[in-house]
Amino acid sequence: MSEPTVPAPRPMRAVVFACRWCALLGADRAGRERLDLPPFFRVVPVECAAAVEPDLVLRALADGADGVAVLGCHLGGCRHNEANRAAKVRLDLLGDLLDAVGLDRRRLLLSWGTAHEAAQFAGLVRDFAAVLEELPAPDPGLFPLRQGSDASC
Amino acid sequence: MSARTVIAVCECFGTLGRALPRRDLEAGLSARLAGARIEFFPGLCRAGDLDRLAGLLAEEGAAACVAAACSPFARGREVLAGLEERGCAAALALADLREGCAWLHAQDPAGAVAKAADLAAMARAGLERRGRSPRASLPAVQRVLVVGAGPAGMAAAGTLAGLGVPVTLVDRQDRPGGLLRQIGRLFPDNIPSQDFLAPLEEELGNPLVSFLPKTTLAGLAGDPGRFRARLANGAGESELEAGAVVLACGAMPVLPEGRYRAKDLAGVISQMELETRLRRAEAEPAGWDLDAAVFIQCLAARDAERPYCSTVCCPTALKNALRLKALRQDTAVSILHRGVMAPGVALEELYRRALAAGVRFYGFAPESPPEVLGQGRAAGVQVRDAFSGRSLDLPASLVVLSTPLKPQPALEGMARALGLRLDSLGFACGREPVAPLAAATPGIFVCGSARWPVYAAQAADQGRAAGIKAAALLASGELDPAGLGLPGPWPGTSAVRSAACSRCGQCVAICPYNACRREADGSIAVSAARCRGCGACAAVCPSGAAAVPESNGPSLRAMLREAMGGAPGVDL
Amino acid sequence: MRAFTSDSDPAPRTPALPVLVVGGGVAGLAAALDLGRLGVPVLLVERDGFLGGQVMRLDKLYPTDHCGFCPVWTESAAALAHPLVAVRRHTRLLDLEPPATGEEGAVAVLETRVPAVDPALCVACGLCREACAARGVAGAMQDRPVDRTWDPAGPPCPSIDFSLCNRCGACVAACPVQAVALERAPAVERTPVADVVFATGFAEPAGPLAPEFGRGSHPDILTALEFEALSAEANGGELRRRSNGATPRSLAFIQCAGARDARYLPYCAGVCCMHALKQARWARRRMPGLACAVFFTDLRAVGKGYEAYARAAADEGILLLRSRPGLVLAPEPAAADAPGAAVAVRYEDFATGRAVTAEFDLVVLNGGLAACPLPGAERIRPKEGPVAGRSCGFCAEPADVAQSVVQGARAAALVAQRLVRRAGGRP
């Protein structure tokens, strides 16, 4: 049996699901304004926040993300006939689930129409980075299939 | 020659290198994009570079190409469009290395390079697993159904016919005109309503218009381009196929009932009744001898039960006050109001004319409404003037009550059949603010007072607007599913794999467009005409049966793995 | 377009000449898109460098509370992408000349003033700014358009401030796509058009209008659009007074300032009451302690959902006062140096019947909105008839966003019907 290896500390990573209407516009504007942000996040454009299923969020966390953000339009401003309301209900529930399994709901950041302007997007990203840094590392037993984990399956 | 995926990196004329040094970027990309062909271009949005890339893709026989360039809001989309114009058969994706990376992380080049490599790898992984939605043209029936033949419906039908589109116009009454038939003159210029209706009626004489009197809409099925409407009249029901439907069923006035003693005093009447009396008097002015009249505004409006302003009542009162003055100059006319709602140039000018004609205006607060006095018949109105605080006694033998318009009782059922949302007051909604007449479902339009109380000219404007939109939808004879939705790249449409579908119906419940439907045999099908590719069904499907090919589960999951630096992970 | 077929010539034809749409604001965009989608070619001219007009300058919209650009940029992008809509930005209609004999329509005289950095060519690489920073004058090249409005439907092009530029030409040489030129003569062209839709919108007239409101007399007395710009600058954070950069504690909106006034603008501009309510609600959302008062004559909240919006404003603690102030006094110059010198508003309090003076750190004057002219309107053929209706949006009659887009479509419908009749279309 080989010595259990201590996994090297991974750099902080977050996935940002951004609807391609309000949310992606905010990200683009932050770029236009050349706002300085830490490069820990990766934006995944989606057609609507309603397309983000809880399973995707959990997979992102299982794949090594420290946090996942879902950015959609204002409630009442969804281009897809209010589909973001259903998304909010589902993702708020997912937050409860994250708390229940010990992952902490603060790993899931939801924003409905508040990140469509440059400074707001930047502020949201910086605040998220600060929150994620403070959170304790999750129990490795939650992610037995993560590479580098010394749990076997 | 192996068909490698091509990663075309735009250097933005060397400036990308400020945050993403070329050597480091090349090394980072090669490490993360094993097996792909990586090429750098000075300025990918330029014709020369696009030609070169198109040639390279052809030479490589590439099935997929990632353009690692600037934001889709800058020139990124143009790069993809340029490749499509050059006939590239490869699947294309954009990775935003500029606004999304270089411009945000100039202070951390190492982190920026790692992110750029991840973004390119994400785009490639998503691209290689994503599908293409079928884009078959949908038939567009060359006929529009217009429900309601008031000024809005008449203008819609007239416009459609004028643009060469056959139209079926239905109304539950036996002739067109709606509420306007009961109104003698229209503000702001006091023209006879017949003069307003006549040109609209003439347009209805177009042979392309088929007017069905005493007919209502009983139900609607089908999809954009091919709706099936159930029409009901005295003889029974019939079915009509239509490419689009315009709802113009109007609104109806609230009745004063017993408010302000309307039921127990003669001479306390509604505006609609005043219209009738004025029409008679204007035709035969000899017997008219009104000494004093008082209008009371905002009856049963802007209160807890109906918390809205009905738009038309103040201009109507101004118009009718002037008509009273025209019949007999020395009639004392007063308007008791909670604000004179006459916005704009024409209506403010109407207000000034009323002032100049000697109409008196007194504001009252909602907490202290006026009191109508009299025995058997109206004698006067007592009101506390909100400005001076003094109580005034206004003698009046005619008290005219302005009530709001409210939604037709039939509107709720029709809205449900058409998939139109209703607001909290029961009026139909479009997509505010830039598409106020359009429902979420393409081909369904609402106009006139069914959407919100409007006056005749506004109703006709909205009818014409709905008419041209319906005509434009059907103009080419076919519907392109990609052209039906929101502007921008087509997200594709959902499809449900019956082999995996458990028929739970969650997609049907969540679909914002009623595109996911349960068929007669219990299976689930998606209407390509209604689906807008939002992905809500795919997100809620427990078995992965529902998916939009362009953003399917495997492609999103692969993107997530690449976002984490390419952890192999396990695709469960 | 099917409407242009006839029994003798059943193949659909596209009209040969485009319809000119003057103005690329929400009304013009609606007209252009409806015509284009119907199959009618459109020439859309817009004076500014971006589409969307005044709405792009609005921080938020009522009653949806969306940002101004959000619902509009997709329409702009759609117009730019549509194969039948030709968009010419930085282009003004100078005049319309009558069409050649026997024809209908007009000849449009268009002037295009491409800015020094041509947005049609610019890729926003930034090399011009780097060159200017190295060899030019600091601040001469701005990283955004002259009017500071980002156009989301195009790359973030820089602009040159010619009051600072020393014309060294470094930017011209540095540009890899020849997008920069320091001298550009305006180009005037004449192009025949089949018909014209006017959608030139509105502007705030220059000059103080009613002097008793003190417009232009103090940096903390602003017009509606100046306040929108101030709001946008705050970028979601706190507002700042223009006089001393301090955080305002109080904000007043004065409705009908110079409007509904026979001496100046006799009409009602229609949109200002809702506009003020929206500005007040958003100011308080961002700065919860801010005292907001709206001085109105008639609070005209008549559109769909507007009354509910007004009630929400009152419920949120915004003071709605029925009174038209008689005087707005800027602080004395000496007192202006003292921190916190506020603007005085003198009005009649109808509850007590007394004249009251209240002080506010910022005062916004609403009501001064005037329709933009319609160049050459009288020279189009055929002349006005029962279905003329060529003008739409605020340039025709004060209109909010929803009304403007409806009228744009209505103008398009009337123009299209005329074209069909002219083409002898069936029937």
Image: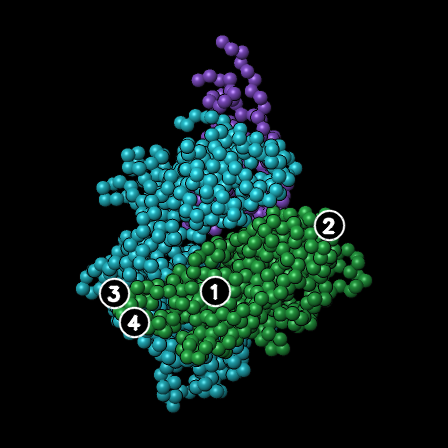
Chain colours: A purple, B cyan, C green
What's the amino acid at mark 4? Pro
Residue that numbered label 1 is attached to:
C43
- Real-space Cα separation, disc 1 to disc 2, in angstroms: 41 Å
Q: Nearer the viewer, mark 4 or mark 3?
A: 4
| Coordinates of residue C219 in the picture (x, y in percent) | 71, 61
Q: Nearer the viewer, mark 1 or mark 4?
A: 1
Name the residue furthest right: C334
Q: Nearer the viewer, residue C349 or A129?
A: A129
Chain under numbered label 1? C
User: Are dots 1 and 4 on a single chain?
Assistant: yes
**In the structure shown, which secondary structural element does the residue marked by tag 2 occupy?**
helix
Asked if B127 appears above or below C50 in the picture, the reply is above
What's the amino acid at mark 1? Leu
- Real-space Cα separation, disc 1 to disc 4, in angstroms: 27 Å
Residue that numbered label 2 is attached to:
C135
Q: Quadrant of residue B463?
A: bottom left
- Real-space Cα separation, disc 2 to disc 3, in angstroms: 77 Å
The structure residue drawn at horizontal position 33% and vertical position 50%, both measured from the top left corner, is B529
What's the amino acid at mark 2? Arg
Lower position in the chain sequence, tag 1 or tag 4: 1
Residue that numbered label 4 is attached to:
C427
**In the structure shown, which secondary structural element does the residue marked by tag 4 occupy?**
loop
Q: Nearer the viewer, mark 1 or mark 3?
A: 1
Check whether the beta carbons of the residues at disc 4 and disc 3 lie within 8 A of each other: no
**In the structure shown, which secondary structural element does the residue marked by tag 1 occupy?**
strand
Residue that numbered label 3 is attached to:
B215
Chain under numbered label 4? C
Q: Nearer the viewer, mark 2 or mark 3?
A: 2
| Coordinates of residue C109 in the picture (x, y in percent) | 53, 71
Quadrant where the C terminus of chain B lies?
top left
Q: Nearer the viewer, mark 2 or mark 4?
A: 2
